[in-house]
Each structure stands twice: as C-alpha cells, then as structure tokens.
Image: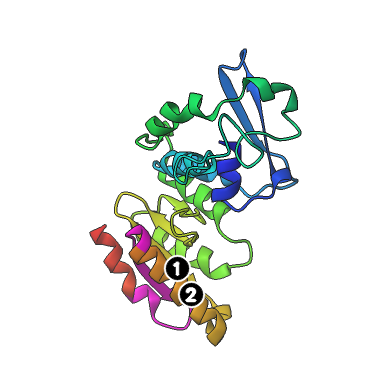
Amino acid sequence: MERAIQAAYKLEENELASERLGQGQYLLFWEASEGGAGVLSQILENPTAFQALAKEALDICHFVHEKESCTKACYECLLSYRNQFDHPLLDRHAIRGYLDQLTKSTVNRHVQGMSREEQYQQLRAQTDPNSAFEREFLDELYNQGLKLPDSAQELIPEANVKPDFLYRDAKVAIFCDGSVHDHPDQQEQDRIARENLKYSAGYYVLTFRYNEDWRAKLSVLNSF
C-alpha cells in the first residue's frame, strides 16, 4: 500500500513512511518529508481513494500484468533493502484477496458537528497559497450562502488532475483560473488535463476566470 500511494500520488520514496503496529495488525502511514504534500488527508477525504490504491497495488504485485519470473515476491513488487529481514515471509499471493476487497471499498469519514464556518475555514486552509482568486471565489460562495465544496486541491488519481474545488457526490470539478492561465501553453495544459478529468474520470468540469463576470455564473452551483 505504501508503494501504491507513492505511485498514485507521484511521491518520492522518502516522502512517505510506514510501520506495523499492534503485532502487525495495523499499519501507520505518515508523510516523512518536511511540510508534506497533504496526500494522506486527501485519501481520507476521498470515498473511493482505496479503490484506486488497491488497483495500483494489484498492478505493482504483478496481478494485472503477470510476471512469470516472480513467484512469491521480487524487488519490483514487495522486496526492498529496508525489509530484507522479512524476505522469507513475503508472498504477494497472500494479500491478493485483501486487495481485491479494497477495490470495492469506500472511505466514510464523517466529521461530527462541523459547522458551515468550520467547513469554510478548512477549505480556505486547503487552497493554493499562491492563488488569491481561489480564496476570493470561496469567500463569495460563503457570503452568498451557496453550498460549499467538499474539498480543495484534492488529487483525482484516475485522471492525475487536482481541481481547485470538488463536489464529490455530484462529481463536479471547479477550476479558478487566475492570470497565469492566460498564457497559451498553460491553456493547452489546462485543456488536456480537464478533458482527461471529464472523459477518463467522468467529472463535470466548471471553469471560472478572473477576468470574466464569474459571480454571475455562481447560480449554476445551486443545481448540485
């Protein structure tokens, strides 16, 4: 699962660490690099995160594309220099059933008693520090009493795209384009990423630009 998280969220090996707790009954993951990328929080906020991670883990363990030379484990799947003392115990086939179960799992993380104000403050803290427009957009939603997004800057692994805001149940992804998105190269990157999000992951994409009357478009959010 550690390697699956690293692969799905494009992390370096030294950015994520894990250890077994309770005689191996539990796994503790933490972001090892200073500051962190907020990946673990994103996983907890995404109900289908473990489905994608389990599929990634199945691929890493050669169950998607079989590797005949790997019987129980190899250095491309489970073995590493860090776990060399466990090499005789490792068997990729022992975890296949568990990973198959996870491909149908959902994460239910209900925050008891979170008020609208608390949700707003949490979303504001998740926005891109370099994007004043994101916070202006969120402030307008809050002030108009519109439904607040479920998350900000959450990675959608199946499309490898991180919308500015997300309504999960409605599968609506929102992008707030500031002046940096005026450059033609950036616009082409945006087009490819958003089409991938739409056609590969099935999200409805809404874009709000800083230099348009974006406030007049906010009423569309009432339908979600």
Kindly check if marks 1 and 2 are in contact, taking CB atoms under 8 A apart as contact. Answer: yes
- Element type at mark 2: helix
Q: Is residue 108 visible?
A: no
Q: Is residue 114 magenta?
A: no
Q: Residues within 10 Å of mark 1 (few under 14, many from 20)?
A: some
- The residue that label 1 is drawn on is 175
Q: Is residue 203 magenta?
A: yes
Residue 63 location (% of width, % of height)? 46, 39
- Which residue is at 37% across, 36% downward? 106
Residue 113 location (% of width, % of height)? 41, 33
**Is 167 placed left or right of 53 in the picture?**
left
Q: Is residue 207 visible?
A: yes
Q: Quadrant of residue 71?
A: top right
- Which residue is at 34% across, 60% downward? 203
Q: Residues within 10 Å of mark 2 (few under 14, many from 20)?
A: some
Residue 112 location (% of width, % of height)? 42, 31
Q: Which mark is residue 190?
A: 2
Q: Quadrant of residue 97?
A: top left
Q: Earlier in the sequence, mark 1 or mark 2?
A: 1
Q: Nearer the viewer, residue 222 or 77?
A: 77
**Is 78 placed left or right of 50 in the picture?**
right
Q: Which residue type carries mark 1?
A: Phe
In this view, 95 is above or below 2: above
| Residue span colored magenta | 200-216
- Element type at mark 1: strand
Q: Which residue type carries mark 2?
A: Asp
- Which residue is at 57% across, 21% downward? 26
Residue at the top extreme of this rendering: 23
* Front: mark 1 or 2: 2
